[in-house]
Amino acid sequence: MSAVDLDTGPAENPLVVGLERQPVRSTAMVIFGAHGDLASRKLLPGIYNLAHEGALPERVALIGVSRGQLSDEDFRSNAREAIERFSRRRPDADVLSGLLANFSYVRGTFDDPALYAQLAEALGALDAGVGAPLNRIFYLSTAPEFFPTIARKLGESGLSAAEGAEVRVVIEKPIGYDLASARAQNEAVLEHFAESQVFRIDHYLGKETVQNLMALRFSNALFEPVWNRNYIDNVQITAAEDIGIGSRAGYYDGAGALRDLVQNHMLQLLALLAMEPPTAFEANRLRDEKVKVLEAIAPPALHEVAEMAVRAQYAPGVVSGAEAAGYREEPGVPADSRTETYAALRLQINNWRWAGVPFYLRTGKRMARKLTEIAVTLRPVPHIAFQGPDSDGVRPNQVILTLQPDEAVSVSLGAKVPGTKMQIRPVNMEFHYGTSFLSESPEAYERLILDVMRGDATLFTRGDEVEALWRIIDPVLAAWAADDQTPIPQYPAGSAGPAEAAALLGDRSWRRL
Ligand code: BG6
């Protein structure tokens, strides 16, 4: 039998070969902004759940970095509190204590060279303790203005590479504010890291149903033959939220719905839905296909924006039975803010597969309910042989992928109503994750953190892809910024959005929320 590598297990253990769970190399993870909301709500609970499932490498060390005066013990106890509060499953006392024992804390400001010297020392000590270099992950869970500084300091202090180990850097959104700033940010990071070391997170790509979109398209013979302009009439992508902006006015008022959700999450959904089949589910093959389809979306000319984009803000209303303030009354939002909390777009993909098929996107805060779905509507059948009122129920087929709140796929079909007449009515063929797999889906961050540890960038956004995404919405942002006079349409909180959005669809209509 071959030698056992303690890090990866027996090289050719027949019980391990073929298992989906690939061994992951021992890793030290440094979280910049370890005190922030994202770390508390998503990253630390995500890491705990990976530990709970035994999915983490044999050795994992986590170093939290922020400006607060904390001891290791304080950091561990804060982390424990966050995990107990936000973990999707109740933590097991032993697993949690075992995990926290490997947490430590380094205090510092992100531009201070002393911080990086301390980090180098702490990471070196971890390597020495294990007797081998650990892979290193630097997770930038900070405000985006710090990304270039941290990347530069890591580079200058020699931490962007490590002898005998992989070094990776994880960047959270927003990646830039527009095309030019995204480019500048990419350049700043790529000055010190190779693209293959950079993992740009879009948490939607970690969602089970988003990955299922690819499974559905590329592991079934049923859909792909009709997935084109010959059979598809239109596609609607909805990301409606019932929540408002909470305490995020500082960020949100400078961003708006287009930057917050469309530029990243929604266009990613569109790209996965519309891309050509990649030859392999390998990071660059998949991302090449996404970039190609994104580049086939012609950015609108400034004068075309009014025809293809609608923005709006929520006004006071009622959400889930409770009164909700309007956007301009939210704490921290200027009373004359023109930031959109709703955005709807009509896009065209100018390629052989999709020419002429409209893609409608809409997203908004404080809408009637949380619903994220992709609805693909096929063309009507060419001839209906059933006569008169019996044919009234014949409707175009729809394939609906629901991402949230329930994870489901449904296909609508015309079926005969039982009885002596040939009467047709649409019925749904449905598949629900909860009932088909009887298991709770992992949180997006769990999958993504594990992928970074594995070095698999398939579900992360490549630098050129970020730029392709911005290229599509840059003119919309520019046209909206240039118009500081036209009143911003309002929609009552708790509604389906502004009446103005109907105009984008012509004879068609938005799906009911
Ligand atoms: C984030 C946005 O990226 O996605 C938030 O900044 C938004 O404004 C969130 O609420 C939605 O994510 P999810 O997973 O709840 O659909």
Image (cartoon, rainbow, N blue to C red):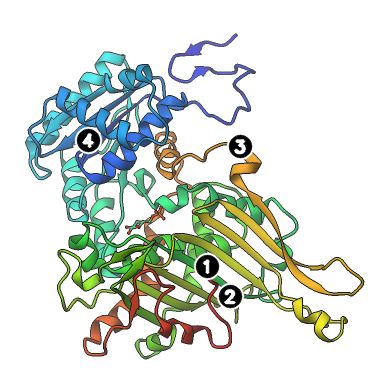
Quadrant in the picture for residue 462: bottom left
Residue matched to label 3 = 438
Q: Where is residue 236 in the image (x, y as percent from the top left)?
A: 54, 71
- Dot 1 surroundings within 10 Å: few (below 14), some, or many (20 or more)? many
Q: In this view, does 328 lie above or below 480?
A: above
N-term mark: 3 or 4: 4
Ligand 1, by image quadrant, is bottom left
**Mark 4 or 2, closer to the camera:** 2
In the displayed structure image, the side of residue 121 where residue 363 appears, left or right: right
Give the distance between the C-alpha atoms of the residues marked 2 and 3, in whole angstroms: 40 Å
Residue matched to label 2 = 351
Residue matched to label 1 = 293
User: Which amino acid is tagged 4?
Assistant: Leu
Foreground: 81 or 115? 81
Tell me whether circle 2 and circle 1 mark residues in contact (CB < 8 Å). Answer: yes
Q: Say how many tags the image has.
A: 4
In the displayed structure image, the side of residue 229 where residue 346 appears, left or right: left
Give the distance between the C-alpha atoms of the residues marked 2 and 1, in whole angstroms: 8 Å
User: Which amino acid is tagged 1?
Assistant: Val
**Mark 3 or 4, closer to the camera:** 3
N-term mark: 1 or 3: 1
Q: In which quarter of the image is the N terminus?
A: top right
**Residue 107, numbered circle:** none
Residue matched to label 4 = 159
Tag 4 secondary structure: loop
